[in-house]
Image (tube, rainbow, N blue to C red):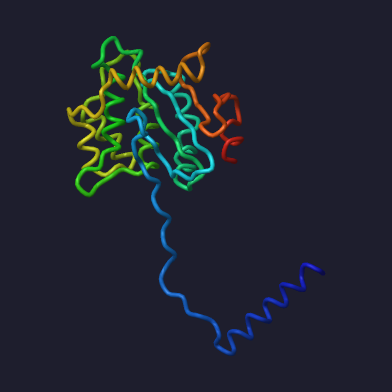
Amino acid sequence: MRLLRPLVALTTLGLLLGAVGCAREVTGSPAAPAPAPLALSEDGYGIVAGFGDAPARIEIYAEPQCSHCADLQREFGDRLAYHVAVGDLQVTYRPLTFLDDDYDGYSSTVANALFAAAEAIDDSAATGTQFQRFVEQLWVNQDPGGQPFSGDELFAMAVDAGIPERVAEHLAGPQEAVDIVDMENTNFDLLFEVDQINTGTPTVYDLDAGEKIDLAEGWLDELVGP
């Protein structure tokens, strides 16, 4: 009964307010939430997806030909995109290219496209959520040891991820969006600082706790909730 009385009182109050006309009329729909931003890290060798005030902030070290990195995206890619979108999580991707035979191979092509995706073209720019979906597309469709993605393939995956066509055209082009050698050296040094024994990919680093995350089942729930 203690649960019913307040409901009755609220219902009665609502009827009274309606009768005397003291309610304010609200027109239109609620404002849509701001899209998650996308930017480069301060050192220029990471791509940051999500809000700066997110309660959880991580770095993901990933190699485009790493099959375990693809597994990570298959299992968690959609949820990472969701938490970036709602502001629970900020993700900084730090690509590596150590599985390339040279600095113009498969992994370098993907890494370059990732940095190009973060560039605004005219009035078009990708959001952090779209970028995360693009990452998922690239890793889920990976072909380790195969030919680099063509421009048409990169464009199709970017558009499928929701990235604006002008940006998709740009990232699919031949431009150099990042110095691959400097990127590889910088990101590998940072990865080595995170774990000098099991230095590999994927590595997920908790920027706030200052520690490597154990990717056992439930790690994302522990970080941001289900």
Residue found at x 51% / y 17%: 195
* In this rendering, position of residue 40 left or right of residue 50: left
| Residue that sits furthest to the front in the current view | 42
Q: How many numbered discs, if any?
A: 0
Rendered location of residue 162, percent (x, y)? 32, 43
- The quadrant where residue 223 appears: top right
Place residue 101 in its image quadrant: top left
Among the 4 quarters of the image, the one containing residue 62: top left
Quadrant where the C terminus is found in the figure: top right
149 vs 161, left or right, is left
Q: In this rendering, is residue 195 above or below 25?
A: above
What residue sits 44% from the left and 43% below the top? 52
* Residue 173 on image: x %, y %: 18, 31
Is 161 positioned to the left or the right of 191 in the image?
Answer: left
Q: Which sits in the foreground, 17 or 191?
A: 191
Quadrant where the N terminus sits is bottom right
Q: Name the residue at the bottom extreme.
A: 20
* Foreground pick, 92 / 126: 92
Q: Residue furthest right?
A: 1
In the rendered structure, the answer to whether residue 6 lies left or right of residue 193 reads right
Residue 15, percent from left and from top: 63, 83
For the point 44% across and 35% down, which residue is it?
A: 91
x, y percent for residue 217: 60, 27
